Amino acid sequence: MRGLSDPDIWLAGDAGVKNALKQGAISFSAEAGRPWRSYLTLQLWQLLAATAKPTAPQTSATQSNLLENH
């Protein structure tokens, strides 16, 4: 998209794009976004990131054992 300098790349199969469209209950036609679908994709990813729930970092079994032994 940016690397290719193409403002009209649409990643229809991208899981992030699909999830953002579902979360926003957005009715969308890929053709309606022409010629700026690359920018639309970036906006959808940002929407998804903004609505994501923060998760606590997971510790591995090795890290847990080290913490218990000290």
Image: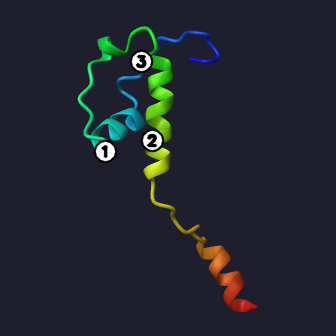
Query: Looking at the image, is 64 positioned above or below residue 35?
Result: below
Q: Earlier in the sequence, mark 1 or mark 3?
A: 3
Instruction: State the residue position of label 1.
Output: 23
Instruction: State the residue position of label 2.
Output: 47
Q: Earlier in the sequence, mark 1 or mark 2?
A: 1
**Which label was assigned to residue 10?**
3
Colour scheme:
rainbow
Q: CA distance from mark 1 to mark 2?
A: 9 Å
Left or right of 26 in this view: 55: right
Given residues 65 and 30, the one toward you in this image is: 30
Q: Amino acid at mark 2?
A: Leu
Left or right of 27 in this view: 68: right
Question: The C terminus lies in which quarter of the figure?
Answer: bottom right
Instruction: State the residue at coordinates (50%, 39%).
Output: 46
CB atoms of marks 1 and 2 within 8 Å: yes
Q: Give SS at disc 2.
A: helix
Q: Amino acid at mark 1?
A: Gln
Question: Dividing the picture into quarters, in which one does residue 56 lie?
Answer: bottom right
